[in-house]
Image: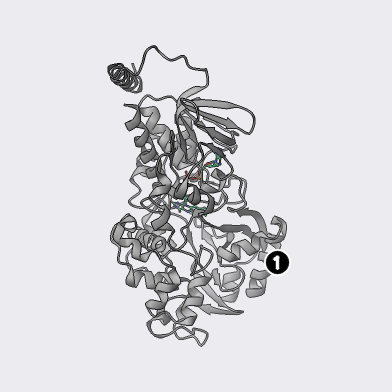
Amino acid sequence: MSKKRMTATRRTVLKTSAAFAAGAIAAPRVRAAERSDVIVIGAGFAGLKAAIMLADEGLKVTVLEANNRVGGRAFTADHIHGSPELGANQIGPYYARVRDMADRLDVELGPGANINAPFTFAIGDTLIRKEDWESHSLNKTVGDEREALPSAMQGYYMKKYNPFDGLDDWLEPEAARFDIPLAEWLIEKGISKEGMRLANEGLIAPDVWNVSLLTLLQESTRNRMMSEGAGDAKGMDRFEMAALTSAHVVGGTSRLPEAMARSLGDSVLLNKIVSSIDMSGSGVDVSCLDGSRYQSDFVISAIPFGPLRRVTIFPALEGNQSAAVRHMPYANNTQVHMRLKGEPYWEQDGMDASLWTDGPLNMVRQPLGYDGSRDRLVALCVGKKGERLDQLPPKERGEFVVKEIERLRPSTKGKIEVTGVHSWPQYNFVSGCRHSYGPGQVTRFAHDMIKPHHRMHFAGEHTRRLEIGMESAMESGERAAFEILERTI
Ligand SMILES: Cc1cc2nc3c(=O)[nH]c(=O)nc-3n(C[C@H](O)[C@H](O)[C@H](O)COP(=O)(O)OP(=O)(O)OC[C@H]3O[C@@H](n4cnc5c(N)ncnc54)[C@H](O)[C@@H]3O)c2cc1C
């Protein structure tokens, strides 16, 4: 008998005897063929982790995934030149759950994560070398700020004044005083007008007045922990410092959720767009857009709030939980992937190859391949810049980006070919790159919005305690699985 089966038998005995003792069971219940103990909606890291834990405990689990692939925001674009990661890549040094899962499923991790060629800065139309920034006439920042690179202004203040030590300090009651607009705090800390403008430029949230300082302090704590051990990395941005101490999945991040889904066998069903969750009877009745129906004792929603808004839930969510699902903002991230041809443009103009701009693009990164290759570029637009770019049809987005790069760096002319365009806000079933909190929303929503609702439990990056990545998604799946296990014993 397998270990899994033995566990299941022990649990069944425990459950059954407890229920008989309580007088709850008169006779064994007859189950429909598609009935499970738990339905998990969404096969991202959160949903798959929850499903694996519940299956380990002998519960019958069905995972319903809307897409034709698993992984959600872990998406290795094998259809684009160079197989870029459209989503998650860095596996932080403290990502115990992710690392354990890779180990258990024999998914190979390699040292380091995606790293870019160093950046040149474009202020208006002027290209500035990193080493020239501090004394450059276009550096209009004031005092000590001057030494912070234009891309690192927010990080500079975070690094200097972040009071948090632990990853979940942001949820402690005394942290509520930081649930204010980022801008308010930066002003209190003495940021200059130009400093504020630069801090706004690269912000993934809508703007410095519409994002909670608390979430950014949480992210900064995470970045500090990620980059500890990177040594003296002056001049590197925080992604690069974190990349030095991280790991990556060999062959692409998608390989890990794919292995997780494989370990669940035929319990994972693709192309199942969940449209309603009905808990009015003695269990849960889940319907999908294709007309199929699934029943269970419990359900875990491991889908972002964007798509959850489109699911009918009965009895309906109430109060803060309902308001959170309806109103919580998501940050955006729009990408244009490109292939480089011809002579290296950075050798021709003598500037570092990646570009940070205060124009319509945020960054044009040159990813350095693990094999040392330098034949790709990726333009990233976040916040309002991403929203603006998304107004164009995909083909025109690519053309716009190439024109803008060629305008800023004439040495790139005729050398760039667009290979793919990806917008997380416009991507079905995710609708944003990551959940964000507006000022006051951590205090109002963070605790209430993850409470179980009847037989429904919540998981996903948006229900995080720890941080913003794959580890937090897995941690949330683990929490939801434990909540259900406690109810089934
Ligand atoms: C650009 C980018 C870069 C990132 N970089 C990193 C990084 O380097 N390191 C890191 O740790 N993290 C990174 N992240 C964050 C990480 O990808 C996420 O935190 C994590 O993957 C979220 O997992 P999840 O399970 O919560 O949600 P998701 O991955 O979004 O999974 C949700 C799933 O639900 C499905 N779904 C939605 N609606 C329905 C429905 N109606 N019915 C059924 N299924 C549905 C979706 O198709 C999806 O598969 C990055 C994210 C992005 C976007």
Q: Nearer the viewer, residue 123 or 391?
A: 391
Q: Is residue 477 visible?
A: yes
Above or below residue 310? Residue 84 is below
> SS of the residue at dot 1?
loop
Image coords of residue 405 (percent x, y): 64, 69
Image coords of residue 136 (percent x, y): 49, 85
Q: Quadrant of residue 412?
A: bottom right
In the picture, the quarter occupied by the C terminus is: top left
**Residue topped by disc 1:** 414
Queried on whether the Cβ of the residue with tag 1 lies below 8 angstroms from ligand 1, the answer reads: no
| Residue at x 43%, y 47% (from the top left corner) | 449
* Display colour scheme: one colour
Above or below residue 376? Residue 314 is above
In the picture, the quarter occupied by the N terminus is: top left
Q: Quadrant of residue 168?
A: bottom left
Above or below residue 103? Residue 90 is below
Image coords of residue 249 (percent x, y): 44, 45
> How many marks do you count on the picture?
1
Q: What amino acid type is highlighted by mark number 1?
A: Gly
| Residue at x 36%, y 50% (from the top left corner) | 465
Q: Is residue 341 visible?
A: no
Residue furthest top in the image? 27
Above or below residue 252? Residue 350 is below
| Residue at x 38%, y 35% (from the top left corner) | 481
How many residues crowd mark 1 within 10 Å: few (<14), some (14–19), many (20+)? Answer: few
Judge from the rendering whether residue 96 lies leftward or rightward of residue 115; answer left or right: left
